[in-house]
Image: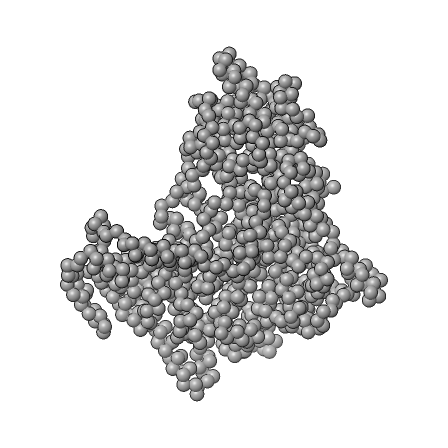
């Protein structure tokens, strides 16, 4: 699941450990720096034991300076964000106050970053929470001397950290005003930005002497170069997990329609700078309490976020059902990741990671830190139980654990419980107390267990694949629990969240299913209307095209469980027929995922279908040439949507964007898009480079949800790729756009001044350049986002919602039909002679690809009349405008073509 052993986990606990390591390194480094840079080369007098005056500087050779600088360097400026473990661990907590006093007495207020103060404040708060747990354990075991001494030690550590925090807050208050009523710990909690910004302050620090005479610095020795190469070579050859290697070798054999030149190696080389597993950790027992509390706290943070998004749909439909389904399944995946991280941290004590052990510790033995138990005093027994349920049991997911436990206990291994529709208990919504909530949860859990048992049986009998299309992780966990009769924390958390969703949606739980059926029918009809044989002989694509039609039909439009249910009903003597689509009608997450999958399939298959020809490019260039000649021509909506899928400085758009001469645009088609006459190979994908990030995001999500094969795409890998794509988005947003004219110039395209240029044969789009500091910041931000479950969920949320509102609104197959009709109208405008040259009559035996030579033929005519000097270029352009206007008139008279096509497909 992780590619490196030293990679930190996710969530609050991981942020705490990384922040602590960062802060410790910063304190040591900053203390050394502020003392060494004191005027006259002497350190100030510090009234603290262990701090002495520095000796006067002595003249050193360059080699001595380099050796001394190397000894004091902190390698945090490495582009891979490497941290020095020894530096972080070498500073004991007893030294921190001494070092902090050095900083307080010698540093300027500007040298104390807010990020450091926020991190320290968060570390103090988390240690206080853990200390409360620890104090409870110590109070119950007064005879345990070791525990009592450990408790006193941790109390002293907190006091030391609080004194350090007070010193730093005093310094920072000197440069910014803080109101009297402001609470710093609430106003400025530690966030991901603090972790990112701390790397900025943790740069390589050397003494001023070591920085002198840079031009005279000795070059690296041959031994140094060999050592560097050896380290890099060793790192690059690190073995990958078997699953990662398998996924790399299963790439599709067909050419990709997206360019994948983004550097992703930094995702796998991030060194967090935390202690390795074999290092002694003096806080093992102390850390355990924090670890468990943060584990449950992160669960509730994720749960609350997803709940709020489903409420947004229920109240005002402000979020798409597809988005809700994807982020909910992402939450299930994050629960798995959090549990796995906990198990990895406690791999020598696996019994401590059992849900029952952790729940007993927090719920019964010690208590939950944020609960005010004094407020329970004076309550009646009924009120006490109600508070206990709402504040504690619900926070821990305890009721869901009890429900799952009872359900599994009542289902014998290998059995499939079946219940006729008339015997099913009606779901009663509106639960408002513990009793009604238990009844509600028991009812819907039985729905889940019966359907999960059936899915397990179908897979065991090899009637369906081991992993079904877009199958949510919760259903897979249920099936695994039925196999092993074991309950994991991730299953409890996922089910607890799913119950919340059912409670929020109430009777509208069927809405995702209804939307799924509409989308599925529309997609299947559209794919069946377009024969891939008309555009390509590629067997791999044609096989995938047919497979997507088949599985969309089987899993969205047909109930693949119905026949087996019917047979089981008859075997037990039930005369009733099972209810069709019972699972998808009552499982909004899977229905939403299947709906989203169908949209991805429609877009991906349509894009690949169109990419086997130059029909879209030919239509685009002629349309923009016509608009350059006559700007009053109506807007072609789908064509402008296609333009949005390319970056402004891509080769595709540079041929017409900003070019006002229609003749130059037509010539640019031949120069940038269409290969030379006589070319008999597949379409040149060079013209398809420069895609917008939305296309790459769609491809990432398509590989996550578009395939039925088991483990085709590692569940967490797609989140890492989405982080990478967001990095690229910020690169383009955060830097001035590369001039389109420079792309034209580098590829030999025309801007209207010269119409007789020749193609260079070289295609290149220069990516936007950022300064090293900005590039490093974005890399850190993308990687560190993994530390926050909410950051990851928001990332998935934004990616899916943007995709649904943008790229997935473009129907590639419809645009392909429109482009074909457009080229036919333009061809007809030039009369029978042009029809004969194009040799296209429509129908079988005349593939639309023949039409993509039309811009090339017009370019030849324009060049011929230009050489003849008879001034007939305007006549050719006039006929082009006439053909374009005729097409747009037909489009307008037919009304909204997109809506009409969708209505026909829905019938």
Determine the image quadrant of residue 51: bottom left
Residue 434's place in the image compared with 81, above or below, is: below
Horizontal side of residue 158 vs 721, given as left or right: left
Q: Is residue 300 visible?
A: no
Decide if residue 485 is on the left or right side of residue 285: right
Tell me the quadrant of the picture where the C terminus can be found. Answer: top right
Query: Which colouring convention does the figure follow?
Result: one colour
Answer above or below: position of 358 versus 746: below
Left or right of 118 on screen, residue 708: right
Q: x, y (%) of residue 737?
A: 42, 38
The outermost residue toward the top is: 870
| Residue shown at the point (67%, 68%) measured from the top left | 482
Q: Which residue is rendered at x = 40% and y = 73% of the image?
A: 281
At x 40% / y 55%, what residue is drawn? 233
Q: Residue furthest bottom?
A: 143
Residue at coordinates 53% horizontally, 30% vertically from top-left?
675
Q: List x then y, in percent, for residue 688.
A: 52, 37
Q: How many marks?
A: 0
**Direction from residue 771 to residue 604 in the image, left or right:** right
The image position of residue 544, as x and y in percent, is: 65, 46
Q: Residue 290, can we see it?
A: yes
- Picture coordinates of residue 144, whole percent (x, y): 43, 85
Q: Nearer the viewer, residue 704 or 505?
A: 704
In the image, residue 293 sits, relative to residue 147, either above or below, namely: above
Q: Quadrant of residue 60?
A: bottom left
């Amino acid at each position: 699941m992780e590619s490196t052993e030293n990679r930190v986990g996710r969530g609050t606990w991981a942020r705490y450990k990384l922040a602590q390591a960062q802060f410790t390194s910063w304190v040591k480094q900053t203390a050394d720096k502020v003392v060494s840079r004191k005027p006259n080369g002497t350190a100030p007098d510090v009234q603290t034991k262990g701090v002495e005056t520095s000796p006067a500087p002595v003249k050193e050779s360059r080699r001595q300076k380099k050796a001394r600088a190397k000894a004091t360097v902190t390698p945090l400026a490495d582009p891979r964000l490497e941290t020095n473990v020894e530096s972080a661990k070498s500073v004991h907590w007893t030294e921190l106050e001494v070092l902090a006093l050095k900083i307080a007495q010698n540093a300027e207020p500007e040298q104390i970053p807010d990020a450091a103060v926020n991190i320290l404040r968060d570390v103090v708060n988390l240690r206080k929470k853990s200390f409360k747990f620890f104090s409870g354990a110590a109070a119950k075991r007064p005879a345990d001397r070791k525990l009592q001494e450990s408790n006193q030690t941790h109390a002293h550590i907190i006091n030391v950290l609080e004194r350090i925090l007070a010193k730093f807050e005093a310094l920072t208050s000197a440069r910014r005003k803080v109101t009297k009523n402001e609470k710093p710990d609430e106003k400025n909690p530690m966030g991901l930005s603090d972790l990112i910004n701390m790397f900025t302050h943790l740069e390589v620090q050397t003494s001023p002497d070591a920085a002198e005479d840079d031009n005279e610095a000795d070059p690296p020795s041959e031994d140094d170069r060999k050592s560097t190469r050896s380290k890099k070579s060793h790192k690059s050859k690190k073995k990958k997990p078997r699953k990662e290697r398998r996924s790399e070798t299963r790439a599709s054999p067909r050419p990709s329609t997206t360019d994948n030149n983004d550097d992703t190696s930094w995702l796998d080389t991030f060194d967090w700078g935390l202690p390795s597993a074999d290092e002694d950790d003096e806080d093992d027992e102390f850390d355990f309490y924090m670890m468990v509390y943060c584990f449950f706290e992160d669960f509730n943070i994720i749960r609350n976020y997803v709940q709020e998004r489903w409420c947004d749909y229920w109240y005002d439909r402000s979020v798409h059902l597809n988005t809700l389904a994807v982020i909910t399944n992402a939450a299930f995946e994050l629960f798995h990741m959090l549990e796995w991280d906990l198990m990895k941290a406690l791999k020598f004590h696996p019994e401590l990671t059992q849900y029952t052990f952790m729940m007993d510790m927090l719920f019964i033995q010690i208590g939950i830190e944020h609960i005010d138990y004094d407020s329970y005093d004076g309550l009646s027994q009924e009120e006490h139980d109600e508070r206990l349920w709402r504040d504690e049991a619900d926070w821990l997911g305890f009721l869901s654990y009890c429900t799952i436990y009872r359900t599994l206990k009542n289902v014998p291994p290998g059995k499939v419980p079946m219940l006729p529709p008339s015997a099913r208990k009606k779901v009663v919504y509106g639960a408002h107390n513990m009793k009604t909530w238990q009844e509600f949860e028991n009812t819907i859990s039985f729905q889940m267990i019966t359907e999960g048992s059936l899915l397990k049986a179908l897979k065991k009998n090899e009637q369906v694949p081991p992993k079904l299309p877009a199958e949510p992780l919760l259903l897979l966990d249920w099936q695994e629990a039925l196999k092993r009769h074991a309950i994991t924390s991730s299953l409890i958390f996922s089910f607890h969240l799913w119950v919340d969703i059912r409670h929020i949606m109430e009777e509208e739980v069927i809405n995702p299913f209804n939307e799924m059926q509409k989308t599925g029918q529309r997609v299947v009809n559209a794919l069946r209307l377009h024969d891939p044989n008309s555009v390509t002989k590629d067997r791999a694509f044609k096989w995938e095209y047919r497979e997507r039609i088949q599985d969309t039909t089987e899993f969205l439009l047909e109930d693949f469980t119905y026949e087996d249910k019917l047979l089981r009903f008859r075997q037990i003597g039930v005369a009733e027929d099972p209810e069709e689509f019972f699972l998808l009608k009552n499982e909004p997450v899977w229905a939403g995922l299947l709906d989203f999958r169908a949209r991805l399939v429609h877009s991906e298959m349509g894009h690949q279908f169109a990419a086997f020809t130059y029909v879209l490019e030919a239509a685009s260039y002629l349309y923009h040439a016509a608009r350059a000649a006559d700007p009053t021509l109506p807007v072609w909506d789908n064509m402008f949507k296609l333009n949005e899928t390319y970056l402004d400085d891509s080769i595709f758009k540079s041929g017409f964007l900003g070019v006002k001469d229609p003749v130059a645009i037509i010539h640019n088609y031949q120069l940038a898009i269409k290969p030379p006459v006589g070319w008999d190979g597949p379409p040149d994908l060079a013209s398809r480079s420069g895609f917008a990030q939305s296309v790459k995001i769609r491809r990432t999500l398509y590989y996550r949800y578009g395939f039925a094969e088991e483990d085709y795409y590692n569940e967490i890998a797609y989140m890492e790729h989405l982080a990478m794509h967001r990095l690229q988005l910020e690169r383009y947003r955060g830097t001035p756009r590369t001039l389109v004219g420079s792309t034209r110039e580098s590829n030999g395209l025309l801007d209207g001044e010269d119409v007789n240029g020749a193609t260079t044969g070289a295609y290149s789009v220069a990516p936007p350049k950022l300064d090293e500091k900005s590039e490093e910041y974005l890399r850190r931000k993308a990687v560190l986002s993994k530390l926050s479950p909410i950051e990851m969920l928001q990332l998935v949320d934004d990616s899916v919602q943007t995709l649904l509102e943008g790229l997935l609104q473009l129907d590639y197959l419809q645009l392909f039909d429109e482009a074909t009709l457009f080229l036919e109208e333009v061809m007809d405008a030039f009369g029978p002679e042009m029809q004969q040259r194009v040799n296209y009559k429509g129908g079988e035996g005349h593939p639309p690809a023949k039409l993509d030579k039309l811009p090339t033929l017009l370019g030849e005519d324009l060049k011929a009349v230009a050489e003849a000097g008879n001034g007939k270029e305007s006549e050719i352009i006039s006929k082009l405008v006439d053909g374009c206007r005729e097409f747009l008139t037909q489009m307008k008279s037919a009304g909204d073509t997109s809506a009409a096509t969708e209505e026909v497909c829905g019938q």
